[in-house]
Image (spheres, rainbow, N blue to C red):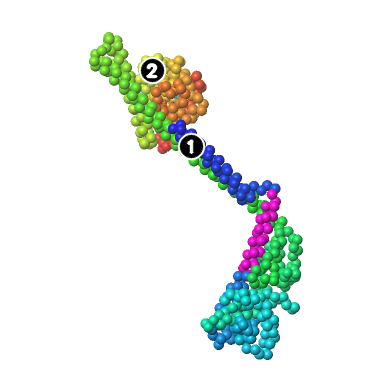
């Protein structure tokens, strides 16, 4: 048992160590142990700014690419007759397409739209662009973009290579409306604007969007990023509007993280402590039960072997003289008495444990009961060399009690007084009235009870730990029975003690005229 105690303590120490180490590692990894490390705050804000800018660019790109896929899928390259209708559909739709040109890859002669005066202007524009297309690197059905600076403005187009059934290759070119594209950009950037200054610029740092704010590249937490495949001539620039507030928030966040980490550590420690305490109690109880069984076995074995020994001598008539015979008889008598007292006590204990309400209350007088019981006990005590002094006040009133239970408690107290007395063999039993209680006190001049054990002596199976006590027979249930009796009467049991000077146990029973519901504690 001792060994398992040791085991558990070691296991607990290891667990606590592990928790402490993992908490420290966790804290430093999550940058919570940051005192004075402001660069960590900077890193957090920079990281979130970069993340936001990249996400926004990705969303815009995705929107354009999705658009491209829809419009390129609308044109069936195998059915030229459907082209005018499809192009019409595209132009009318919400795809920002101004014009569509379809031509064979190996010629700059348009198949669609057929050349006419009306498109002369845009056709010319297109022909210039045509030379800029990277035609050799094209992949079938993959959308590409043309983003060019012109004298008047920027130009944006998407184009795709298609192959018909016969393996003929065509290029479809979608001229995209710039204003409408800028409007889409504006819509996406609006989400950022509450917290960031946002701008879209070209490589000369000239703002593209209407009402553009100009952002200094030296601003704290400034970040810019390109549109990788679509509007590749432009850059998105962002800078937090109110970074002092953001810095404060980041700092607070870190404080909260630290607090939460410490809190969870404390919670884990608390849980461990609870598990430890509960486990310890459990183990103590098991230990007490084991002691109890061995104590009781011993208690029964000793008188039994004495009875057997002396009865055998008597039966085989090996007695020296009449005096010895009488002595053997009295040993057999007292040992069997001792055994039956122990068995009775065990049965009482079991009964009280089982049926806590099993008392039979009646109106009786504690003083008279004690005097009567002591008459029978006095002889036995005197035989053991004890002086029994009885002090009974005359004004003790009748009250509602279970006389058998009170006698049981009295005998347990007397038994202890006798057992735990050494040189001075004197026991005083007194019954008095005090503040609505009848007080039955048993005082001895014995060895006394150490302060640390004074509360625990009433616990089930508890026995004193002193070497002197261990030698004295006992099962650790006498005082438990006494306390249960007190509580069942709505009263209590008190102890006063001084080491080497003796102890006084006082059983307090409330004075009642009528029975009340018994306490079940
Ligand atoms: P037991 O006497 O069988 O051990 P009890 O429940 O009656 O069990 O008492 C519990 C413990 O309280 C005892 O083991 C002893 O240490 C202590 N004790 C009880 N009564 C006295 C007393 N009168 N003087 C000193 N110690 C006492």
Secondary structure under badge 1?
helix
- Of marks 1 and 2, which one's residue comes earlier in the chain? 1
Residue 223 image offset from top left, x and y in percent: 70, 62
Check if mark 1's residue and mark 2's residue have beta carbons within 8 Å.
no
Above or below, 416 relative to 204? above
| Picture disc at residue 8 | 1
Q: Is residue 353 visible?
A: yes
Cα distance between the residues tagged 1 and 2: 47 Å
Residue drawn 61% across and 48% down? 27
- Is residue 46 in the magenta section? yes
Residue 257 image offset from top left, x and y in percent: 61, 50
Residue drawn 41% across and 22% down? 472
Q: Residues within 10 Å of mark 1 (few under 14, many from 20)?
A: some
Viewer-nearest of discs 1 and 2: 1
SS assignment for the magenta stretch, majority? helix
Q: Which residue is identified by label 2?
A: 381
Above or below, 342 relative to 211? above
Q: Is mark 2 within 8 Å of ligand 1?
A: no
Q: Where's the C terminus, which quadrant?
A: top left
Residue 61 image offset from top left, x and y in percent: 62, 70
Q: Is residue 443 visible?
A: no
Q: Quadrant of ligand 1?
A: top left
Residue range in magenta is 37-60
Residue 219 image offset from top left, x and y in percent: 74, 60
- Is residue 87 in the magenta section? no
Q: Residues within 10 Å of mark 2 (few under 14, many from 20)?
A: some
Residue nearer the viewer, 271 or 117: 117
Secondary structure under badge 2?
helix
Above or below, 51 relative to 291? below
């Amino acid at each position: 048992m001792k060994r398992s105690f040791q085991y558990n303590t070691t296991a607990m120490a290891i667990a606590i160590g592990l928790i402490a180490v993992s908490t420290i590692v966790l804290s430093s990894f999550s940058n919570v142990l940051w005192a004075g490390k402001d660069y960590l705050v900077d890193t957090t804000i920079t990281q979130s700014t970069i993340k936001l800018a990249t996400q926004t660019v990705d969303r815009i790109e995705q929107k354009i690419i999705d658009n491209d896929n829809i419009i390129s899928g609308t044109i069936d390259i195998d059915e030229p007759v459907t082209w005018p209708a499809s192009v019409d559909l595209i132009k009318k739709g919400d795809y920002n397409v101004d014009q569509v040109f379809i031509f064979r890859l190996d010629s700059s002669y348009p198949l669609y739209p057929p050349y006419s005066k009306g498109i002369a202007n845009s056709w010319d524009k297109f022909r210039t662009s045509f030379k800029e297309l990277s035609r050799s690197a094209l992949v079938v059905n993959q959308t590409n973009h043309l983003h060019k600076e012109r004298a008047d403005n920027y130009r944006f187009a998407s184009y795709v290579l298609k192959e018909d059934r016969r393996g003929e290759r065509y290029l479809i070119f979608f001229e995209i409306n710039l204003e409408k594209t800028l409007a889409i950009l504006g819509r996406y950037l609006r989400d950022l604007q509450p917290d960031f200054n946002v701008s879209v610029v070209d490589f000369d740092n000239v703002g593209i969007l209407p009402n553009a704010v100009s952002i200094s590249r030296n601003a704290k937490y400034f970040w810019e990023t390109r549109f990788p495949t679509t509007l590749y001539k432009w850059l998105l620039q962002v800078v937090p509007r109110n970074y002092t507030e953001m810095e404060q928030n980041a700092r607070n966040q870190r404080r909260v993280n630290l607090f939460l980490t410490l809190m969870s550590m404390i919670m884990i420690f608390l849980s461990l402590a609870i598990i430890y305490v509960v486990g310890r109690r459990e183990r103590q109880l098991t230990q007490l039960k084991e002691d109890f069984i061995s104590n009781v076995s011993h208690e029964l074995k000793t008188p039994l072997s004495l009875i057997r020994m002396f009865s055998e001598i008597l039966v085989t008539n090996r007695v020296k003289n009449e005096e010895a015979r009488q002595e053997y008889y009295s040993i057999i008598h007292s040992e069997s008495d001792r055994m039956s007292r122990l068995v009775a006590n065990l049965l009482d204990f079991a009964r009280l444990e089982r049926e806590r309400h099993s008392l039979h209350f009646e109106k009786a007088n504690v003083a008279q009961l004690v005097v009567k019981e002591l008459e029978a006990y006095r002889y036995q005590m005197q035989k053991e060399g004890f002086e029994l002094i009885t002090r009974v006040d005359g004004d003790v009133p009748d009250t509602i009690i279970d006389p058998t239970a009170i006698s049981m408690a009295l005998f347990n107290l007397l038994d202890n007084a006798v057992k735990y007395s050494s040189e001075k063999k004197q026991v005083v039993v007194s019954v008095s009235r005090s503040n609505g209680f009848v007080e039955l006190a048993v005082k001895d001049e014995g060895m006394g009870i150490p302060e640390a054990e004074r509360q625990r002596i009433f616990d089930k199976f508890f026995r004193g730990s002193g070497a002197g006590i261990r030698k004295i027979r006992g099962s650790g249930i006498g005082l438990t029975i006494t306390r249960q009796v007190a509580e069942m009467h709505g009263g209590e049991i008190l102890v006063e003690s001084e080491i080497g000077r003796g102890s006084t146990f006082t059983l307090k029973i409330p004075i009642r005229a009528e029975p009340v519901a018994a306490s079940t504690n």
